[in-house]
Amino acid sequence: MTQHVVAAAKRYYPGLLEGKRPSQNEAKGLKLHEVCDKLELPANREGKLTRQQKQVQEITGALKFPEKVLVVLSLPLHRLARVGSFAPPEAYLAALLVLELAYDHRFDSLTYGPGEQRLGLSTRTHIDLDEPAPSELQGTADATWGLSKDVYGYIATRSCAAIMHGVKSVHVLCESSYATEGVATQHLAQKLEYAQQIEQVFGSLSVRPTVIGTDSSSNLAVGASKGAASSRSKHTLRRWVSVMKRMEAKQIYLAKVNTDDMPADFLTKFVGKAKLAKSLKRATNSDKALPPK
């Protein structure tokens, strides 16, 4: 992935290759998350795209392939993609800052290997961001609610590193936070089914259900068929039908994860440096990575 990032920098931000970062002067002290979180489509979206608007689209597209490995890019790229059809002026600065982020992480990799099988089938699963991911297939999903840009993020690991991850917009109307969490769980369960089918073909599918972690107690209660948080929520239960059926078939097992240790948290919002570092370390299994040549 290093060459893809370097090629993007050479084309759109050649100063990076020389150690120059003029975008920092334009940012005037603003951080990447501050710029990205303010991005909104302008009310007036008429006329032809400017050169900078086209470059926002091109930079976003150029980094989508590296993002398959560079999980740190997922959320900022999603912020850019939301406004890519007619990017506001500040989106160009955001694109340069994202390119800087990609360049700083260009040597990141996903390192797979043997590990411990630690996830038992209980309503509260043990996940610690200070510990590596387990060897067996496992997924976690998280979501935001009440924002103008509600999203859900998911990450699944196998052999101690991420095999899939992503950030998606929540397009359905949700009247509560646990409803968006349910959307996240539902979509992750669908994606995990593909991973389970691949494992079955290779004869390595576990006899135990795949654990899906959620930090929402209400989502757990509904998904695990233990009753909705409120009788007024019954009309939303249809969103959990696929999750319930997969649990009945013992394909998945929904379990509670502490919010502070949610591996997918950094995919739904910008988190502090310490938590981001721990989240990336767990997702990539960087402790076992070989140093770049």
Image (tube, helix red, strand yellow):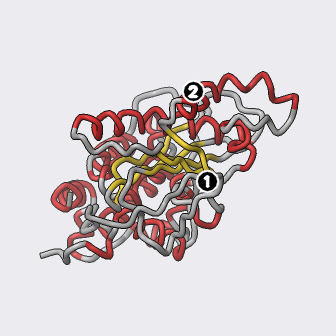
In percent of the image, x 40 and y 66: which residue is there?
Answer: 23
Using the rendered view, name the quadrant where residue 287 is placed: bottom left
Q: Is residue 126 left or right of residue 65?
A: right
Mark 2 Cα within 10 Å, few/some/many (few <14, many 20+)? some
**Labelled disc at residue 259:** none
Residue matched to label 1: 122
Front position among marks 2 and 1: 1
Q: Position of residue 166 (x, y in %)?
A: 44, 46
Q: Quadrant where the N terminus lies? A: bottom left
Q: Position of residue 74 (x, y in %)?
A: 42, 51
In percent of the image, x 65 and y 26: which residue is there?
Answer: 239
Residue matched to label 2: 245
- Residue furthest front as drawn: 207
Q: Is residue 163 left or right of residue 250?
A: left
- Element type at mark 2: helix
In percent of the image, x 29 and y 41: which residue is there?
Answer: 199
Q: Is residue 266 above or below residue 275?
A: above
Q: Is residue 174 above or below residue 162?
A: above
- Element type at mark 1: loop
**In front here: 98 or 115?**
115
Cα gap from disc 2 to disc 1, whole angstroms: 18 Å
Tell me the amino acid under the disc marked 2. Lys
Q: Position of residue 133 (x, y in %)?
A: 42, 63
**In front here: 50 or 119?**
119
In percent of the image, x 51 and y 48: which residue is there?
Answer: 211
**Mark 2 or mark 1, which has the lower sequence index?**
1
Q: Position of residue 265 (x, y in %)?
A: 56, 57
**In front here: 71 or 86?**
71
Tell me the amino acid under the disc marked 1. Ser
Q: Is residue 212 above or below residue 269?
A: above
- Total marks shown come to 2
Q: Is residue 80 left or right of residue 293?
A: right
